[in-house]
Image (tube, rainbow, N blue to C red):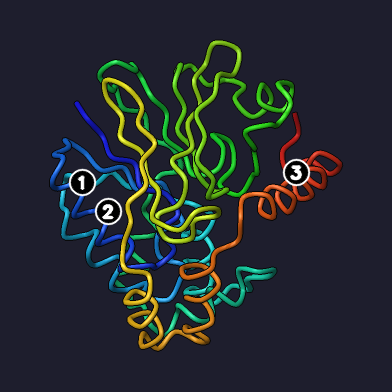
């Protein structure tokens, strides 16, 4: 079995289409969608394209899906997600809400060459917790406590890595739609090895499509996250500060 892992698409349909074209050329058995799928400039079109994959797609929810459902149900959404939810809700329908509300937080699949593999958006215990490639081993052990799978695939930070954690392999495929670092759409191919991949696509054409999507400030979004994305140094600095706050006031009692 070979699996393509697509994380953090964030409603960037042009990037998704480019990756799916490459996935089709390679040929895979399953496509795991690792959360934060729709929160961005083309949410409905992105969800509809992925629904068309049928049973080939395995869905996992991220904090973005939880927040969109909460907003759809009239609950208050605070923080940076509030703006994203407000922009996406007018573009989504009840069928999209029903799809997002039913997604699991983790999925386990036996992958050829890797064995039982756990898929989650952020960490196995939360959909919004930050864990970084250079996080201390003690932090990793807390995050992975109780996990029996020897391979874990996670997203959320939009930055690809492949590292060992006390004899366990942890992989982040990077982000399809909001990459930090070199431009492109990032994803991973699993089985029997792990390949971190980057798909190039026409960034200017993508930005023009996004600008015409009807999403608030869509042209600025495309410029910030597609044409001239943040570099990995800036992203790591920002995430390291967030992790420090989480450690000081834990999201989950350890």
Q: Is residue 226 left or right of residue 24?
A: right
Marks 1 and 2 sit apart, C-alpha to C-alpha, by 6 Å
Which residue was labeled with disc 1?
23
Picture residue at 75% right of the left edge, 45% below the top:
240
Local SS, label 2? helix
- Within 10 Å of disc 1 (Cα), the crowding (few <14, some 14-19, many 20+) is some
Which residue was labeled with disc 2?
19
Q: Given this view, does label 1 or label 3 mark the residue nearer the observer?
A: 1
- Within 10 Å of disc 2 (Cα), the crowding (few <14, some 14-19, many 20+) is many
Picture residue at 51% right of the left edge, 60% below the top:
64
Vertical position of residue 15 compared to residue 215: above or below: above
Which residue was labeled with disc 3?
243
Q: Quadrant of residue 99?
A: bottom left
Marks 1 and 3 sit apart, C-alpha to C-alpha, by 33 Å
- Asked whether disc 1 touches disc 2, contact meaning CB atoms under 8 Å apart, the reply is yes
- Within 10 Å of disc 3 (Cα), the crowding (few <14, some 14-19, many 20+) is some
Local SS, label 1? helix
Query: Residue 66: x, y in percent?
Result: 50, 59
The quadrant in which the N terminus is found is top left
Disc ID at residue 236: none
């Amino acid at each position: 079995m070979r699996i393509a892992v697509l994380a953090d698409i964030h409603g960037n349909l042009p990037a998704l289409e480019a990756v799916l074209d490459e996935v089709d050329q390679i040929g895979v058995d399953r496509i795991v969608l690792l959360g934060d799928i729709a929160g961005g400039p083309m949410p409905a079109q992105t969800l509809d394209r992925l629904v068309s994959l049928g049973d080939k797609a395995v869905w996992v929810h991220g904090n973005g899906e939880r927040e969109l459902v909460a907003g759809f149900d009239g609950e208050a959404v605070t923080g940076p997600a509030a703006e994203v939810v407000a922009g996406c809700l007018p573009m989504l329908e009840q069928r999209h809400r029903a799809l997002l509300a039913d997604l699991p937080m983790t999925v386990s699949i036996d992958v050829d060459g890797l064995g039982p593999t756990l898929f989650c958006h952020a960490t196995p215990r939360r959909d919004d917790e930050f864990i970084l490639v250079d996080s201390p081993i003690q932090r990793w052990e807390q995050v992975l406590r109780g996990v029996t799978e020897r391979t874990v695939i996670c997203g959320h930070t939009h930055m690809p890595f492949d590292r060992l954690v006390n004899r366990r392999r942890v992989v982040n495929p990077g982000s399809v739609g909001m990459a930090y670092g070199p431009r492109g759409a990032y994803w991973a191919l699993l089985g029997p090895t792990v390949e971190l991949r980057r798909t190039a696509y026409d960034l200017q054409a993508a930005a023009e499509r996004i600008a015409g999507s009807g999403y608030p400030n869509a042209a600025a979004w495309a410029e910030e996250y597609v044409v001239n994305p943040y570099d990995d140094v800036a992203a790591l600095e920002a995430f390291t500060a967030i992790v420090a706050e989480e450690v000081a006031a834990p999201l989950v009692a350890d």
